[in-house]
Image: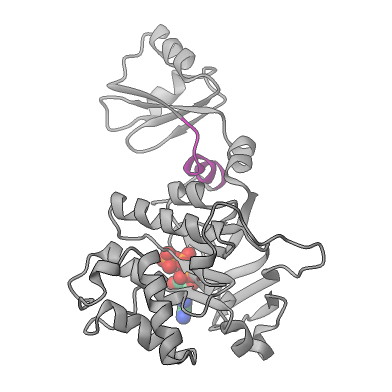
Amino acid sequence: MPLSDRRGSVRFVAEHPGDPPMVGAHRLTKRFGEFTAVDAIDVEVRRGEAFGFLGPNGAGKSSTMRMIGCVSPPTEGSLRILGLDPATDGPAIRARLGVVPQRDTLDEELTVRENILVYGRYFGLSRAQVNAKADELLEFAQLGERAGSVVEPLSGGMKRRLTIARSLVNDPELLLLDEPTTGLDPQARHVLWDRLFRLKRSGVTLVLTTHYMDEAEQLCDRLVVMDGGRIVAEGSPRELIALHSTREVLELRFAADDHAPYAAKLTGLADRVEVLPDRLLLYTDDGDATAAAVHGRGLAPLSVLARRSTLEDVFLHLTGRTLVD
Ligand SMILES: Nc1ncnc2c1ncn2[C@@H]1O[C@H](COP(=O)(O)OP(=O)(O)OP(=O)(O)O)[C@@H](O)[C@H]1O
């Protein structure tokens, strides 16, 4: 169904009990020589959802996406995409997939519109079909006014939107996005998130990787947290936070290079205390009350910030490291 017919806020795709998952992986493994990049992971992505792989660099997210995208065969385990086997049904799967790679692979010397036209021809669309498709996708990507511009001088955000538009030329049911907003400024990221929301609402199943916890929270219905090739947690952002963190976090910065000695003075004030190089994190259900208790112990931090828990806190709790380490 073309995007122009998919507008509106209601998801038109309902999952039926007998439908195969969009992605079904069981003990999926990828090794490079002796090194195991993806270590026996189980994943099930349902039709119509936005599913994320959240993890730091090297967690195995891209290796997983490349297997799902049918460009890298699994070393072990089973994998079904749209109910089909990538080993034997690669072309049939790829015809129903859209892929947005980590780096844009646009033809920078062609115009915005030509980039879509060329791609449409790969999928065997007629000249009339591909022209109509280009109009629709340029509007979707908010690039209509730049249709005749060559790609090279466009901003990073515009190039990403064009890459996404191009990946939609075959009306994919499943769109794979590898770190869709890495390197973009905050405003460009928000514009892109808005476009991805629209796609999801129109019924396209999204599978994305990210190391931005806010991106995962904004976009994903469900996600897995990956570290060292393994899945360390799975659920909706809200479930993960409820299960692995407290309602609030109190961030304290002291005028000292080493924050560890302060942690000892805070015993009993919070469920858990994490010591980072530049601050202490106190996990608590009431940040303001905990801040008052810190002052009550005669401590005077340079700054005190109470905030809600995020997926970053979940990751820190599960792995002992921050996502940006
Ligand atoms: N072709 C390859 N040959 C050898 N090692 C590889 C290959 N591809 C990936 N790796 C290694 O596998 C591990 C996982 O890499 P992968 O790219 O899947 O991680 P990632 O979570 O996507 O991280 P990034 O955000 O950096 O892409 C890394 O240690 C990486 O060096």
Quarter of the image where one finds residue 158: bottom left
Residue 155, by quadrant, is bottom left
- Judge by depth and name the residue closer to the eye, 16 or 156: 16
Where does the N terminus fall, quadrant-wise? bottom right
Q: What residue is drawn where x is 20% and y is 76%?
A: 149
Name the magenta segment's main secondary structure. Answer: helix
The answer to if 310 sits in the magenta stretch is yes
How far across and how far down the image is residue 116, in percent?
36, 81
Q: Where is residue 290? Give x, y as percent.
A: 47, 16
Left or right? Give the position of 279 relative to 50: left
The residue at 59%/79% (across/down) is: 96
Which of the two residues, 201 or 252, is positioned nearer the viewer here? 201
> Is residue 160 rendered magenta in the image?
no
Residue reaching furthest to the right: 18
Q: Nearer the viewer, residue 45 or 303?
A: 45
Task: Please report the bounds of the magenta region as a residue range.
Answer: 308-318
Q: Where is residue 198 drawn, in percent x and y?
A: 48, 57
